[in-house]
Image: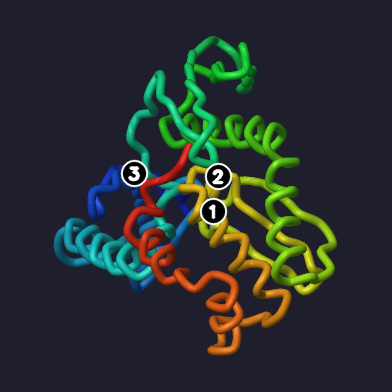
């Protein structure tokens, strides 16, 4: 009768990566090497079950890997920032529309959001949940409300830029939460915009639209693509610089 391998427990810690509070889940396994990967709710560190030396050196290795990733791709670790959510906060959409958010914890199994008086969003979440799940649930619920309320305004703005400068066929426009990019354009002529992009200053948001519409002309980031962008928006590099400096700070 074959022996069953013992299931090894994991341990969870938090590490500071360039000011971000990142949850790290550590697994000790039957393996000969060390591996770091990005999981759904945790960064995963897999280390040998039998190793010589301190576990701290493997944690330091993971931190160095994550710091390098954070510098090259600032949004890659964005979803893991596990600091406790704020019970009340405010955000502004398209430089114009401000909303107050009130978060309440209750003994319930799911989360719910409601718009009150047009400017207050009340979020109710389960009290028995971890910080990562709570923040994710809050972002998701706010994103759904924002997408529903501003979908038509976003469609009109995309239509304006397309009608005046591109004249291309657009199949569908999607507005949903995406933590890794501001927008995308598919080969099927679908324009996808993240609800996070609505938090941008209006002129930077317009740049995101122009950027994605330019992909209807050049489906790449070649010199030809950037010439299309520049022709429509000569100051696009200013907006690119703003995004690199401030973009990672914006979220619900």
Q: Earlier in the sequence, mark 3 or mark 1?
A: 3
Distance from Cα at disc 3 to Cα at disc 1: 41 Å
Residue drawn at the location 46% of the way across and 31% of the way down: 91
Residue drawn at the location 35% of the way across and 73% of the way down: 32
* Label 1 close to label 2 by CB (< 8 Å): yes
Residue drawn at the location 68% of the way across and 57% of the way down: 192
Q: Which residue is mark 1?
A: 205
Please name whichever residue, 187 or 241, is drawn nearer the observer in this view of the structure.
241
Looking at the image, residue 187 lies above or below residue 106: below
Q: Which corner quadrant of the image does residue 221 belong to?
A: bottom right
Please name whichever residue, 61 or 18, is drawn nearer the observer in this view of the structure.
18
Q: Is residue 160 left or right of residue 113?
A: right
Q: Earlier in the sequence, mark 2 or mark 3?
A: 3
Q: Is residue 30 left or right of residue 205?
A: left
Residue 124 position, x and y percent, is 56, 16
Looking at the image, residue 84 lies above or below residue 54: above
Q: Is residue 243 left or right of residue 168?
A: left
Q: Helix, strand, or loop for circle 1?
A: helix
Q: Which residue is mark 2?
A: 198
Residue 244 position, x and y percent, is 37, 63
Q: Which residue is mark 3?
A: 11
Residue 75 position, x and y percent, is 42, 58
């Amino acid at each position: 009768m074959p022996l069953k391998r013992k299931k090894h427990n994991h341990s969870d810690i938090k590490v500071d990566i360039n000011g971000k509070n990142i949850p790290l889940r550590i697994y000790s396994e039957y393996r000969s090497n060390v591996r770091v990967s990005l999981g759904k709710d945790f960064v995963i560190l897999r280390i040998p079950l039998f190793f010589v030396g301190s576990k701290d050196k493997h944690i330091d290795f993971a931190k160095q890997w994550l710091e390098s990733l954070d510098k090259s791709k600032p949004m890659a670790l964005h979803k893991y920032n596990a600091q406790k959510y704020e019970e009340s906060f405010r955000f502004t959409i398209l430089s114009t529309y401000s909303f107050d958010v009130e978060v309440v914890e209750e003994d319930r199994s799911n989360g719910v959001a409601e718009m009150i008086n047009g400017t207050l969003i009340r979020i109710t979440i389960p009290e028995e949940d971890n910080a990562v799940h709570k923040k994710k649930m809050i972002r998701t619920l706010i994103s759904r409300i924002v997408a529903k309320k501003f979908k038509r305004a976003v469609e009109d703005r995309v239509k304006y830029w397309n009608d005046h400068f591109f004249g291309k066929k657009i199949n569908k426009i999607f507005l949903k939460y995406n933590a890794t990019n501001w927008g995308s354009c598919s080969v099927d002529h679908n324009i996808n915009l993240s609800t996070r992009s609505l938090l941008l200053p209006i002129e930077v948001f317009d740049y995101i639209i122009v950027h994605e519409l330019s992909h209807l002309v050049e489906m790449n980031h070649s010199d030809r693509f950037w010439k299309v962008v520049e022709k429509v928006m000569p100051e696009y590099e200013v907006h690119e610089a703003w995004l690199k400096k401030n973009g990672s700070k914006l979220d619900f």
